[in-house]
């Protein structure tokens, strides 16, 4: 199964370049997910690629930061601000990234607006090798 994530363009660029190897989340999927479809938020506003999930870590924040900081793609200040009020965080370890040859329109491709957190999508909906 695939999941569609809304990600800020600055982080999308880092994911596509390999600089960012972890995507952080406050909540995680309830179903078994093998890959993430990347929706780059405003001002980009396009589905630009996907990545395979190597692992998902659920840890207390200090342990999560210490484990991921080298390839977090964010600084410590951003990390702590993002997780403020939480004691546990999730890090999705990015395995293999694929940038689509042609960007996709989320409304035409998935018949939905960009998800606030995440949305499950079917493999057949993404046909952009």
Image (tube, grey):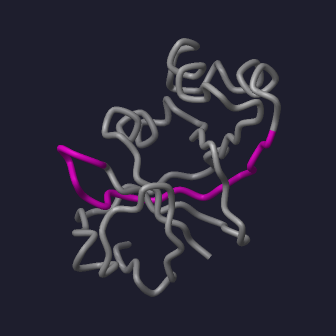
Q: Measured from the top left, where is residue 103 in percent x and y? A: 24, 62
| Residue 94 among those drawn in magenta | no
How many marks are shown on the rendered structure?
0
Which residue shows up at 22% across the image and 46% down it? 42
Q: Please name whichever residue, 47 or 60, is drawn nearer the observer in this view of the structure.
A: 60
Residue ID at (76%, 30%) = 87
Query: Along the horizontal axis of the image, is 48 left or right of 17?
Result: left
Please say if 82 is above or below 110.
above
Query: Which residue is farthest front?
Result: 85
Q: Position of residue 81 (x, y in %)?
A: 53, 21
Q: Is residue 3 left or right of residue 30?
A: left
Position above or below: 121 against 47 = below
Residue 95: x %, y % from top left: 63, 49
Residue 95 is left or right of residue 111, and the answer is right
Left-right relation of 8 to 53: left
Chief SS of the magenta region: strand
Pinpoint residue 59: horizontal percent, then vertical percent.
Answer: 82, 35
Is 69 placed above or below 37 here?
Answer: above
Whether residue 55 is in magenta: the answer is: yes
Split into 4 quadrants, where in the image is the C terminus?
bottom left
Determine the residue located farthest toward the bottom in the rendered image. Answer: 124
Q: Which residues are magenta?
A: 41-58
What residue appears at the point 77 percent right and 24 percent down from the top-left corner?
Answer: 67
Quadrant housing the N terminus: bottom right
């Amino acid at each position: 199964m695939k999941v569609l994530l809304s990600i800020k363009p600055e982080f999308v660029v880092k994911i596509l370049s390999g600089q960012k190897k972890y995507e952080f989340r406050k909540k995680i999927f309830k179903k078994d997910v093998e890959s993430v479809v990347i929706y780059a938020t405003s001002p980009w506003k396009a589905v630009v690629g996907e990545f395979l999930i190597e692992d998902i870590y659920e840890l207390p924040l200090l342990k999560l930061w210490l484990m991921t900081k080298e390839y977090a793609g964010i600084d410590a200040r951003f990390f702590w601000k993002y997780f403020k009020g939480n004691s546990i965080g999730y890090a999705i370890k990015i395995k293999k990234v694929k940038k689509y040859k042609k960007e996709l329109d989320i409304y035409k491709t998935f018949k939905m607006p960009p998800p606030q957190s995440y949305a499950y999508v079917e493999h057949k909906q993404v046909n952009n090798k």
